[in-house]
Image (spheres, rainbow, N blue to C red):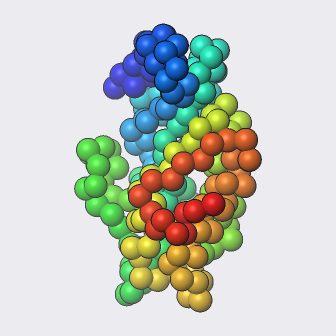
Amino acid sequence: EGVEKGVEENIPLVRDCFAGRGGSHTMRICDDFSMYGDWVNKTHTISGGFRRLAQLISEAGLTPGVWYVPYWASTASEVYKRHPEWVARNADGSVCLIEGRLPQSRRAPAFAIFDTSRPDVQQYFEDTARSWRKRGFRYVTTDFLGSCVTPQRYHDPTMTKAEVMRCGLEAIRRGLGEDVFYRTIGGLIGAGMG
C-alpha cells in the first residue's frame, strides 16, 4: 500500500547514497500491478501516477526505471475482458493460465499469457512500451519472459516458441525507442539477445 510514498521518500536517499557515490544513477519502480496487462498510468498503489514519479526521479538527477511483466494479463484486467482472443491456449483450446505465482494473487488470482504470434498483440506490446517511454522512463525491465513459451497453441501455428517470444521483445524495443535502456529477465537467452 505504500509503494508511491516509498518511491517519493527514497528518491533523495538513492541520489545521495548511491548515485552521489558513483553507483547506479537509476531508480526503478516495481509496483504490484494488480491489473497485469492493462499497464495504466495510475494503479492501486500509485494513485498519483507513474508519470509523476518518473518526473520526480528525473528532477533528482536519476534515470527513471520501471519493471513489468509484458506477457501476463490478469484475468480481471480490462484488456483480457475486451480481447480474450489475444491470449495463448492449451492443446485443448482452453486459455493457458498461470495461477498463484505472486503474492499479489489475492487481487489477480490468475494470469493468461499474451500470444505475440498475433500482429494485434505485437502492436499492443509496442503501444504499451511507448506509453512507458512517454511517461518518462528511460530504463525498462521486463520479467518472467519464459512464461510465453509455456502455452501449447498459438494463433500462428507455424511460429516456434522462440519466434513468439522474439516478436514480443521486438515490439517492445520498437515502442521504447533506441535511447531507452531495455533489460530482459527470465526468458530464452538466445531469443532475447540483441
> Left of 174 or right of it: where is 55?
left
Residue shown at 43% from the left, 13% from the top: 17
Residue 13 seen in this snapshot: yes
Residue shown at 74% from the left, 47% from the top: 178
In the depicted structure, whether residue 39 falls above or below residue 46: below
* Quarter containing the C terminus: bottom right
Q: Quadrant of residue 187?
A: bottom left
Q: Quadrant of residue 107?
A: top left
In the depicted structure, whether residue 56 falls above or below residue 146: above
Residue shown at 36% from the left, 22% from the top: 2
In the depicted structure, whether residue 186 falls above or below residue 135: below
Q: Position of residue 43 (x, y in %)?
A: 48, 34
Residue 81 seen in this snapshot: no
In the depicted structure, whether residue 24 falls above or below residue 101: above
Q: Which residue is more in the foreground, 122 or 187?
A: 187
Q: Quadrant of residue 163?
A: bottom right
Q: Which residue is more in the foreground, 132 or 81?
A: 132
Q: Position of residue 58 (x, y in %)?
A: 63, 20
Q: Position of residue 51 (x, y in %)?
A: 62, 27
